[in-house]
């Protein structure tokens, strides 16, 4: 009887040990699995939403807005070349309709977006809940006239009509700045030039038909229009001083996203900066990747020529300085309310990460 009891006790003890051992093995396996990066890539039926990245401690998926423009090359390259994966972040790329970027940020549809600094000044001064984290490149804006136009200088715009896509678009701001710098009245009190809004796709035809005397557009549309209609590029922010040294395009993020996921915000900024530096050294391959993967429309050879006029050396400091210049001038010509404190606006419009390299070359 004693022998049976001892045997029974041994069986119970061995069973408990096995259970405990199995529990420890499962726990160890779960912990190991949690440390393994999981790659996830999906695409919707229209090819407009892409998720890519490696899960990290914070596995939140960053919702990134994009519009399909040539300027957004760093976003496309960061995805295609694995810079997001390198930073260990998950991203979902969401294609936005033209003119909906600010609403998408405000409503939380996207966490991050891409925009021209000049177009951000007024929304940020009016409470857009976002901050700029880095400048991406210079260039973008052009002013075109017909080859036989009498307009040769800024002074020749007096009494003329100019077509623009909107009264907040960067090319419109660029032209008003150029005219103001050359003594042409562009304020509400003293406007010597008439600006007329057309659909972006209709601007070249409006100029060709004589409905306007000049048009202000972004590349690559401006480049395409100039080639197709034989227009002359009168002003070019990518090559004309001092505008060629001022950053035009930037990354901006929703305030709530930055506050909730500061590490991811910084990692995303680094990925974009690295991708921008790669674009600077590989314009032709960049254009080819963009067209072949249907990120943008157009011809890869032509797009590469446009990219070569931009300076894709990313800089947070450069964006900060350019934003201050543009904001002050926009206030001077009446595009920003006179009661706005520009110094405070500039400070509040940026999130500058302490550990972020100033430039990637």
Image (cartoon, rainbow, N blue to C red):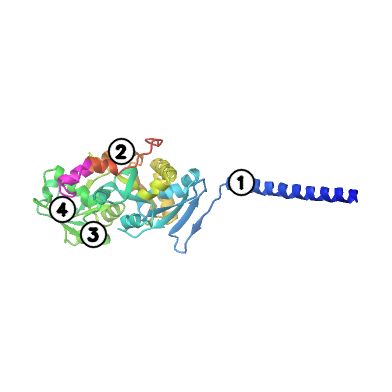
Of label 3 and label 2, which has the lower sequence position?
3
Give x and y (percent) for residue 77.
43, 48
SS class, disc 3: helix
Please give the range of residues in magenta.
327-342
The residue pinned by badge 2 equals 318
Question: Splitting the image into 4 quarters, where does residue 161 fall?
Answer: bottom left
Q: Nearer the viewer, mark 2 or mark 1?
A: 1
Residue 334 in the magenta stretch? The answer is yes
The residue pinned by badge 4 equals 149
Q: Nearer the viewer, mark 3 or mark 2?
A: 2
Q: Nearer the viewer, mark 1 or mark 3?
A: 1
Image quarter (top left, top right, bottom left or bottom right) of the C terminus = top left
Above-or-below relation of 275 to 150: above
Residue drawn at 39 percent across, 49 percent down = 257
Residue 308 visible in the displayed image: no
Residue most extreme to the bottom: 45
Q: 16 left or right of 121?
A: right
Q: Check whether the beta carbons of the residues at disc 3 and disc 2 lie within 8 A of each other.
A: no
**Distance of label 3 from label 2 (alpha carbons):** 31 Å
Q: Check whether the beta carbons of the residues at disc 2 and disc 1 lie within 8 A of each other.
A: no
Q: Residues within 10 Å of mark 3 (few under 14, many from 20)?
A: many
Give x and y (percent) for residue 72.
37, 50
Q: Check whether the beta carbons of the residues at disc 1 and disc 4 lie within 8 A of each other.
A: no
**Distance of label 2 from label 1 (alpha carbons):** 43 Å
The residue pinned by badge 3 equals 203
Residue 104 visible in the displayed image: yes
Give x and y (percent) for residue 305.
34, 47
Of label 4 and label 2, which has the lower sequence position?
4
Residue 31 numbered tag: 1
């Amino acid at each position: 009887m004693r022998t049976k009891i001892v045997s029974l006790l041994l069986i119970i003890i061995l069973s408990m040990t096995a259970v405990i051992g199995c529990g420890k093995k499962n726990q160890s396996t779960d912990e190991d699995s949690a440390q393994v990066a999981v790659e996830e890539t999906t695409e919707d039926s229209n090819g407009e939403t892409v998720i890519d990245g490696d899960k990290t401690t914070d596995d939140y998926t960053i919702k990134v807005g994009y519009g399909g423009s040539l300027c957004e090359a760093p976003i496309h390259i960061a995805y295609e070349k694995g810079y997001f994966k390198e930073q260990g972040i998950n991203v979902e790329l969401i294609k936005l309709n033209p003119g909906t970027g600010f609403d998408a940020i405000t409503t939380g549809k996207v966490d991050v977006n891409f925009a021209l600094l000049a177009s951000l000044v007024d929304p940020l001064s009016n409470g857009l809940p976002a901050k700029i984290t880095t400048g991406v490149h210079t260039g973008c804006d052009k002013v075109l006239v017909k080859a036989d136009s009498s307009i040769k200088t800024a002074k020749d715009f007096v009494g003329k009509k100019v077509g623009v896509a909107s009264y907040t678009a960067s090319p419109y701001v660029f032209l008003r700045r150029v005219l103001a710098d050359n003594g042409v009245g562009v304020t509400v009190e003293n406007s010597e030039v008439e600006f007329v809004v057309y659909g972006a796709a209709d601007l070249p035809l409006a100029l060709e038909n004589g409905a306007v005397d000049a048009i202000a557009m972004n590349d690559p549309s401006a480049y395409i229009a100039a080639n197709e209609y034989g227009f002359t590029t009168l002003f070019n922010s990518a090559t004309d001083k001092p505008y060629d040294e001022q950053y035009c395009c930037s990354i901006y993020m929703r305030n709530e996203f930055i506050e909730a996921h500061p590490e991811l915000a910084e990692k995303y900024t680094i990925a974009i900066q690295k991708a921008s530096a790669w674009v600077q050294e590989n314009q032709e391959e960049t254009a080819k990747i963009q067209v072949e993967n249907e990120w943008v429309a157009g011809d890869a050879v032509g797009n590469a020529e446009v990219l070569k006029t931009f300076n894709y050396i990313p800089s947070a400091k450069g964006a900060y300085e350019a934003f201050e210049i543009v904001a002050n001038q926009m206030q001077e010509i009446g595009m920003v309310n006179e009661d706005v404190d520009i110094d405070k606006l500039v400070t509040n419009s940026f999130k500058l990460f302490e550990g972020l390299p100033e430039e990637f070359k």
